[in-house]
Image: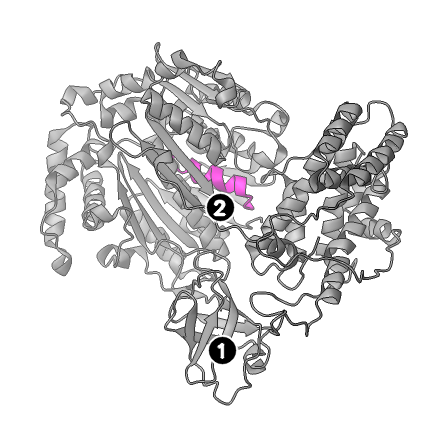
Amino acid sequence: MQVYLHLLYHKISTCFVLIPAKNLILAGVKSVTLHDEGSVELWDLSSNFIFTENDIGKNRALASVQKLQELNNAVLVTALSTKLTIEQLSDFQAVVFTDSNLDDAIAFNDFCHNHQPPIAFIKTEVRGLFGNIFCDFGPEFTVLDVDGEEPHTGIIASISNDNPALVSCVDDERLEFQDGDLVVFSEVKGMTELNDGKPRKVRNTRPFSFTLEEDTTNFGMYERGGIVTQVKQPKVLNFKPLREAIKDPGDFLLSDFAKFDRPPLLHLAFLALDKFVAGQGRLPFPGSEEDAQKLISLARDLNETQGAGKLDDINPKLLQHFSFGARAVLNPMAAMFGGIVGQEVVKACSGKFHPLFQFFYFDSVESLPTEPLEPSDFRPLNTRYDAQISVFGAKLQKKLEDAKVFLVGSGALGCEFLKNLALMGVSCGKEGKLTVTDDDVIEKSNLSRQFLFRDWNIGQAKSTVAASAALSINPNLHVEALQNRVGPETENVFDDAFWENLTAVVNALDNVNARLYVDQRCLYYQKPLLESGTLGAKCNTQMVIPHLSENYGASRDPPEKQAPMCTVHSFPHNIDHCLTWARSEFEGLLEKTPAEVNAYLSNPSEYASAMRNAGDAQARDNLERVLECLSEDRCETFQDCIKWARLRFEDYFANRVKQLIYTFPEDAATSNGAPFWSAPKRFPHPLQFSEADPSHLHFIMAGSILRAETFGIPVPDWVQNPKKLAEAVNKVIVPDFQPKKDAKIVTDEKATTLSTASIDDAAVINELLSKLEHCRKNLSPGFRMKPIQFEKVNFLSEKCLQTLLNHLNLEKHLIV
């Protein structure tokens, strides 16, 4: 999704604004404008991945444009280096202010707040280990989707004729409704009055039931079926302008529940800092006790004017830490706040997800060294790390530079970690070394989030390119790039000496098994591990410290409930069933079957012997798939691939459904006389293919391209032209469906396979092998298929799976 947004960043001198700029440029906003009148300084090099030593003295905005533009040529990136006027803000939909004094920010915010339509205004600061964000999206801002989650649903088991009515749902899944939620009903048999699409309020929600604020006494008697779906309601937020919110900030968003009293204190601290800068014309000096006392005095005076909001304790020690580090913009803090600000900009223009309302404060004083530091420890050394030294001291900086770090993975998280480590100077000393490994190569789909890669890197090893990019950020980085997977098979590479020599390990992996392996290695060798992961808009981190914290593998989620095989293939009733089926079909058709074909063609006699020795239904099924792939489903031209995809559509979404309702009509009953199609089963309806339906054509397009890839057939450019694709599809002759009277559809929930054994399996296997041998002789020498592994970030895999899901909704059941 492209966000059509004109965005202005005012004063990028604190550098971290380039983090949200980077994120939003990758996301595809329409334009980004950077404004700054200042010049690049040496301190900037520890918090800004764009700048190099050659940029020192140049205007910050102008020095940033070219490299940011490389991230996404579809986004217009421009710079302003002259004084910003209020009138210029009219050209933008959102503005982000950093390093601005309070009076200027209030003036700009007043204009944005009163503008029609309002201009989303975000003010943010990072001062050492402290940071804040203020958001104002206008007097009436509508949040269209508060949490971004799919609406919750439930399958109805019964509805009473009462006031209020009691609605019970099947105990297959717990209901996620909350008291006061609005819901709509559909597919209810008997009590059809509820199918009118009218939102109704629920009360007394329980895991599998709720009451409905509706008198159903005179409604029809409930018979069977029905789906209840949550209706997401928009929420209107009344933002106050900055001049009002400063005096009456309201409730603060807590970032740490152990610091519930911290936000009001930090609110006071940042106000005191603004007054300090206004009076002194500068920020406090690092480690200056005199400046710290001045700031504490200002905070104390401000606190006396707060009336009912006056704090009982202003915590002078915390304010001292705040003053000592106020000049520094630390890269980890910049990355965190930059990411949050980027999210807030997207919320402002999309209306999706609840925005910050209105102040957010955060501190990480726990990161400070435990031993007391002398004023001399904060003294700048005229290096790019002086900002960090002003907070943590020179001794800790030396430890960072001499650290030996192992980064496992260089994808989206890996790129961020590499950037952060390089900026912080980790492994940049004489004794330091950063080892990064990843066995993957760069694909086009990676470029939207793995910002160290460019178009010209497609096809190259991720770790090599990422390491090279990190070196351009900090030429002092001692980095080695490997292409090895970390696991038992590479313990000759990552041996005892390698692990024992490490200072710390950082995981940037995308699968649980690899995480568990690295965790066990770290546990055995007593090495600290940073574990993290992302899933959409959600993320997690875990710091594992030997003898101090729990390791990653110590706690495991309970195993997910596995749906019965017959439910997944014939009677799905939730999206998880659909996902499981779609993934299974993808792997079976595009990965496992081509792999079986190659196994047979590589050594026909050995393969035949193995199948004869197995002699079971599974061996028979494998041979049937291989034979089908090399005979009637064999593709030689792209038109053959289109034919294959079109017939698959008919098989999945029409023929199988027709067979199912032929075998089990709508009025079918079980052996004990109960309706067969009772909850959670849902009566299906076959699809009629239509070239006018984009989702139908998308299925054909994705299926034919993937099929062509497995057979090594070139894909023509016209396949993405809907008109030309429809013309090719119309050439396919689709046979009429004839239901089978003796079709066996598995309904036993305890069944673990859909294959049925036969006393004639051995004879069938010999016949299949004979046919296969005949097919093999007709193949070109050296013919092999290309198995396709499903990859969640692969466009075609994603497209095919999504198209399957679009059609496999809960009204269209499948059978095998």
**How would you classify the magenta stretch by its main secondary structure?**
helix
- Label 2 crowd (10 A; few <14 / some 14-19 / many >=20): few
| Residue at the far front in the pictured view | 759
Q: Position of residue 154 (x, y in %)?
A: 50, 66
Q: Residue at x 56, y 46 (%)?
A: 30
| Residue at the far bottom in the pictured view | 218
Q: Residue at x 84, y 61 (%)?
A: 738
Front-lying residue, 608 or 567: 608
Residue 467 - label: none
| Residue at the far top in the pictured view | 430
Q: Position of residue 444 (x, y in %)?
A: 62, 34
Front-lying residue, 520 or 544: 520
Front-lying residue, 328 or 117: 328
Number of the front mark, 1 or 2: 1
Q: Amino acid at mark 1?
A: Ile
Front-lying residue, 68 or 201: 201
Magenta span contains residue 48: no
Residue 346 visible to the viewer: yes
Residue 159 - label: 1
Q: Quadrant of residue 419?
A: top left
Q: Secondary structure at mark 2?
A: loop
CB of mark 1 within 8 Å of CB of mark 2?
no
Residue 56 visible to the viewer: no
Query: What are the residue bounds of the magenta stretch?
Result: 16-30
Q: Amino acid at mark 2?
A: Gly
CA gap, disc 1 and disc 2 = 36 Å
Q: Position of residue 739 (x, y in %)?
A: 81, 62
- Label 1 crowd (10 A; few <14 / some 14-19 / many >=20): many
Q: Position of residue 816 (x, y in %)?
A: 71, 52
Residue 536 - label: 2
